[in-house]
Amino acid sequence: MMKWIHTSDLHIGKQLNEFSLLEDQRFFLERLVELAQKERPDLLLLSGDLYDRSVPSAEAVGVLDAFLSRMSIDLKIPILAIAGNHDSPQRLEFCSRLLRTSGLYLAGNYRRIFEQVTFFDPWGPVHFYLCPYLEPALVRADFPGKELRSFDDAFGAVLDENLPQIDFSQRNVLLAHGFFSYLKNPDSVARSESEVSLGGSDLIDAKRLEQFDYAALGHIHRPQTTGREHLCYSGSPLKYSQSEIPYQKSVVIGQLCEKGNLTLERRSLPVLRDMRIIRGTFDEILRHTPDKQAAQDLIFFSLEDQLPIPNAMNRLRAVYPNALGLRIGQRENPENLEIPDQKAARPMDLLFQDFYQSMTGGPMLDGQDQIVRKICESIEAGGGTDEADPAGI
């Protein structure tokens, strides 16, 4: 039996609203080591975006280095890892041939022929193919006679080049990083705020992967499959955006016996701090006394107050020290606001009222619209609000 733990999108070194998540990531990696000690997998699969930036900080490199060393050197668990779109392929692949002697297999750079690593169990060989994030521009250079416009075109060309060399009567596992979904139903895979691209131009048809016994996928942060159980996104280990808050994070434990006999289990690990949204008026939130753990969570606030609260964030951080941000009224979904056409044709005071409602989620209070109208009339007439004080304030 071949047993693995599959995770992806570590994004080591990530900051959220200038708040470092490095301690949360270090905590997760420690829990992952504990899980590996308990489960004793044959392999660890890391499907891209090991770092959050192509040039990670020294601290981020240190955190990942300590984890990889613990797994491959101390626990003797081989690691297969590929580059994601956030990684620098060249940096990630540095000393990769030398690191193989310690059981760390890193595939950073795109290759026309997938890098193959083979391991054995009582049922024979299991072939693992490493496919880092593919940029169509790089792939086009290898296929000058083909018109490769999209990510699907590029991946299809590379896969077609590899298929004749893969014996699908044996067991084969692919590690890949990208947006894989069925072209006939692209909405079958849910993406978070940080993964959406314009027009779905990076979509790759998941049907291309069906022949593999397992596809260890990365890039999508929500744990899910593409519609086939063996085409699997592990999801990110932590919540990295507000849209990920509702979803339970996990890693995938896979066990492959004879060909066709695959079992998968999702296992959730403890987190240092959860991410939550707290809704209510400013006074209601401050009147509520959270327990010690809840107060340390990563918090976004959605205030239902109609007017801005002076120094709101600093006052909230006195109770919730890891507060990440706040929004007032319906500003949580500003993209749903319908902005009138031909703004220049609308009076200035009405434009301001539109803006006010988009920021607060409600109309101006009685008398406020008259004050704004007087100020706008004075501005349009060329007057100044300081001298004329048309609003009487």
Image (cartoon, grey):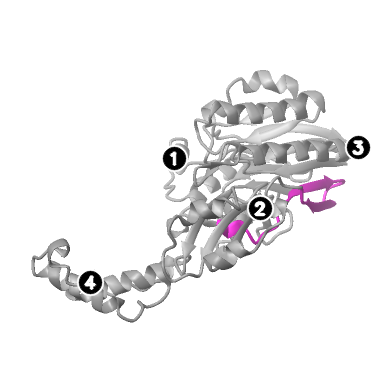
At which x and y percent is residue 80?
A: 70, 34
Which residue bears the numbered disc 4? Answer: 343
Numbered mark located on residue 295 in the image: 2
Q: Quadrant of the C terminus?
A: bottom left
- CA gap, disc 4 and disc 2: 44 Å
Numbered mark located on residue 140 in the image: 1
In the rendered structure, which segment of residues is drawn in magenta? 242-269
Is label 1 in contact with label 3 (beta carbons under 8 Å)? no
Q: Nearer the viewer, residue 284 or 46?
A: 284
Which residue bears the numbered disc 3? Answer: 122
Q: Identify the mark nearer the N-term, 4 or 1.
A: 1
Q: Quadrant of the N terminus?
A: top right
Q: Identify the mark nearer the N-term, 4 or 3.
A: 3
Q: Is residue 139 visible?
A: yes
At which x and y percent is residue 149?
A: 42, 50
Residue projecting furthest to the bottom: 366
The three-letter code of the residue at mark 1 reads Arg
Q: Identify the mark nearer the N-term, 4 or 2.
A: 2
Q: Identify the mark nearer the N-term, 1 or 3.
A: 3
The three-letter code of the residue at mark 4 reads Lys
Q: Badge 2, how many Cα within 10 Å: few under 14, some, many 20+? A: some
